[in-house]
Amino acid sequence: MDLDTWTRFLGLCTLINGALLAFWALLLKLAPDLLYRTQKSWVDLPRQTVLTMLYGFLAVYKIFFMMLNLVPLVAMLIL
């Protein structure tokens, strides 16, 4: 595969993962009760614990998004 193909692939991955990250952040900000009720059927934890865990997972996802999608894409675009 050539550089142009990899750049388009990383661009598409960045777009999809960025949209997922934005959707998750908006859902956590605008509808925390919906997220809690959804997760309550899986685990029986207090509301604050569930929301703290979801926020932590969001932070980890953002770090992986930047390390595995955004930084490689910028490097490919610089090349």
Image (tube, grey):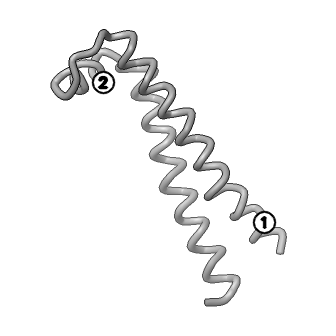
Q: Position of residue 60 (x, y in %)?
A: 55, 38
Q: Quadrant of residue 63?
A: top right
The disc at residue 75 is: 1
The N terminus - image quarter? bottom right
Mark identifier at residue 32? none
Q: Residue at x 69, y 64 (%)?
A: 73
Q: Quadrant of residue 39?
A: top left
Determine the secondary structure under disc 1: helix
Where residue 17 appears, as percent x and y from the top left, is 50, 52
Residue at the far bottom in the pictured view:
1
Q: Quadrant of the C terminus?
A: bottom right
Residue 63 sits above or below residue 40 on the image: below
Q: Amino acid at mark 2?
A: Leu
| Marked residue nearer the N-terminal end (1 or 2) | 2
How crowded pointer 2 is (Cα within 10 Å; few <14, some 14-19, many 20+) is rated as some
The residue at 62%/57% (across/down) is 68
Above or below, 76 relative to 40: below
Residue located farthest toward the right when viewing the structure as drawn: 78
Looking at this view, is 45 or 59 the one in front? 45
Q: Nearer the viewer, residue 50 or 33?
A: 50
CA distance separating discs 1 and 2: 36 Å
Residue 22 position, x and y percent, is: 50, 38
Left or right of 54 in this view: 13? right
Q: Amino acid at mark 1?
A: Ala
Mark 2 highlights which residue? 35
| In the rendered image, the vertical position of residue 5 relative to residue 17, given as above or below | below
Using the image, determine if residue 67 lies above or below residue 23: below
**Element on which disc 2 rests:** helix
- In the visual, does 10 lie left or right of 48? right
70 horizontally vs 37: left or right = right
